[in-house]
């Protein structure tokens, strides 16, 4: 791989790079994790782990996959289309439809190309922004049998968060006109939010929650040059136009587990979606954890809970 992972791979786990296409024909780059002693003559439950919005598979997903592969799951991580090592031009474009589709494309791959996966036992985990996209995929893709989210963000809601109608209208005007500029230039405007090389420490004076993003993405803890923060300027038009979770109640009777930190600034996203979803569902609160702690802190991520949830429901 071109760049390192934020966590060392366990000597009990094997990681294999894979590639497959989504239904639009765009290539998705992924990593497949299995226990080294896995008997591939048998079939196993599988999990697909999606990265935080703007993140890549070498960050939070590798932490989850490294641990869950040791607990008997086949685990697939991936780079979103137009991100990381996946295909898609121009780069750094986001779309609620494309990003939800990536989870279903992972189900396609696991169910057809990996003979030791039981295709009737596939679940998904969405970290941060991928939580919303994972649920969005599960609304319509009934092959996804169980969904867990950690530190969930719903990006189609976040696009409007804290803004007055006048501010939203102004943002639409600016982005709409930016499309002409992008068309004339032949490429879309992209302004990264994180440095190409990691900082030694977060600069002083940065307010929350901006400082929290820097505590992960801009220092050695979670920095990756393919995850510079944000997306093309006009990407937010899609987030403003299409609500991602209008039919979250239709996931029922398949189960949902939503994991949040007790100090997470994003906690309300999970609480709101939890209220809208039908059962079976559970909201699990991790003590002494901020939003980003559920990206990589193995002393905070409730792996026992995740293992029990999926083993109980993928059967």
Image (tube, rainbow, N blue to C red):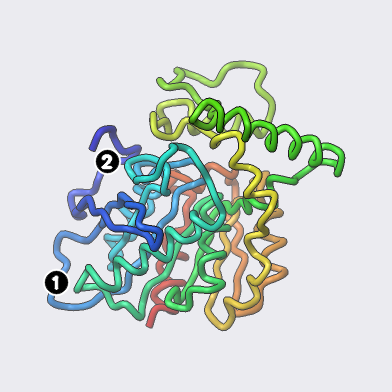
Using the image, tell me which numbered label, if any, was put on residue 193: none
Quadrant into which the N terminus falls: top left
Distance in Å between CA atoms under marks 2 and 1:
24 Å
Q: Quadrant of the C terminus?
A: bottom left
Name the spot of residue 149 as percent of width and height, x first: 53, 60
Q: Which residue is mark 1?
A: 39
Q: Secondary structure at mark 2?
A: loop
- Asked whether the viewer can see residue 136, the reply is yes
In this rendering, the answer to whether 222 lies above or below 63 is above
Q: Residue furthest front?
A: 184
Are there few (<14), some (14-19), or many (20+) residues within 10 Å of tag 1? few
Foreground of the two, 127 or 96: 96
Q: Is residue 117 left or right of residue 82?
A: left
Residue at image point 42% right, 77% down:
143
How far across and how far down the image is residue 267, in percent? 67, 52
Which residue does the image show at 37% across and 60% down from the upper left? 22
Q: Give how far across and how far down residue 281 sits, in percent.
A: 60, 74
Q: Residue at x 22, y 69 (%)?
A: 114
Which quadrant of the structure image shows residue 225? top left
Residue at mark 2: 8
Q: Is residue 98 above or below residue 55?
A: below
The answer to whether 264 appears left or right of 312 in the picture is right
Q: Is residue 146 above or below residue 178?
A: below
Q: Which element is circle 1 on? A: loop
Q: Residue at x 48, y 32 (%)?
A: 217
How many discs mark residues in the rendered view?
2
Q: Nearer the viewer, residue 209 or 112?
A: 112
Where residue 261 appears, as percent x and y from the top left, is 60, 51
- The mark that comes first in sequence, 2 or 1, is 2
The answer to whether residue 214 is visible is no
């Amino acid at each position: 791989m071109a760049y390192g992972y934020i966590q060392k791979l366990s000597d009990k786990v094997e990681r294999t790079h894979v590639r497959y296409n989504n239904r639009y024909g765009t290539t998705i780059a992924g990593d497949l994790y299995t226990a080294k002693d896995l008997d591939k003559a048998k079939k196993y439950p599988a999990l697909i782990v999606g990265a935080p919005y703007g993140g890549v598979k070498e960050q939070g997903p590798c932490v989850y996959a490294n641990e869950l592969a040791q607990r008997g799951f086949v685990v697939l991580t991936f780079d979103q289309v137009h991100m990381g090592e996946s295909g898609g031009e121009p780069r750094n474009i986001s779309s609620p439809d494309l990003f939800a589709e990536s989870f279903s494309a992972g189900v396609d791959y696991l169910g057809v190309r990996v003979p030791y996966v039981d295709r009737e036992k596939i679940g998904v985990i969405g970290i941060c922004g991928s939580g919303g996209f994972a649920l969005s995929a599960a609304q319509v893709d009934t092959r996804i049998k169980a969904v867990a989210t950690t530190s969930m963000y719903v990006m189609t809601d976040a696009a409007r968060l804290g803004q007055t109608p006048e501010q939203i209208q102004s943002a639409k005007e600016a982005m709409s006109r930016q499309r002409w500029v992008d068309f004339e230039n032949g490429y879309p405007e992209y302004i990264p939010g994180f440095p190409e090389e990691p900082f030694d420490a977060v600069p002083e004076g940065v307010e929350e929650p901006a400082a929290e993003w820097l505590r992960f993405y801009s220092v050695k803890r979670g920095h990756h040059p393919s995850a510079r923060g944000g997306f093309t300027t006009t990407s937010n038009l899609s987030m403003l136009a299409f609500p991602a979770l209008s039919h979250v109640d239709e996931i029922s009777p398949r189960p949902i587990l939503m994991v949040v930190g007790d100090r997470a600034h994003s906690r309300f996203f999970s609480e709101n979606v939890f209220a809208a979803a039908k059962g079976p569902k559970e909201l699990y609160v991790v003590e002494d954890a901020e939003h980003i702690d559920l990206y990589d802190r193995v002393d905070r991520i409730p792996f026992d809970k995740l293992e029990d949830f999926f083993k109980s429901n993928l059967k």
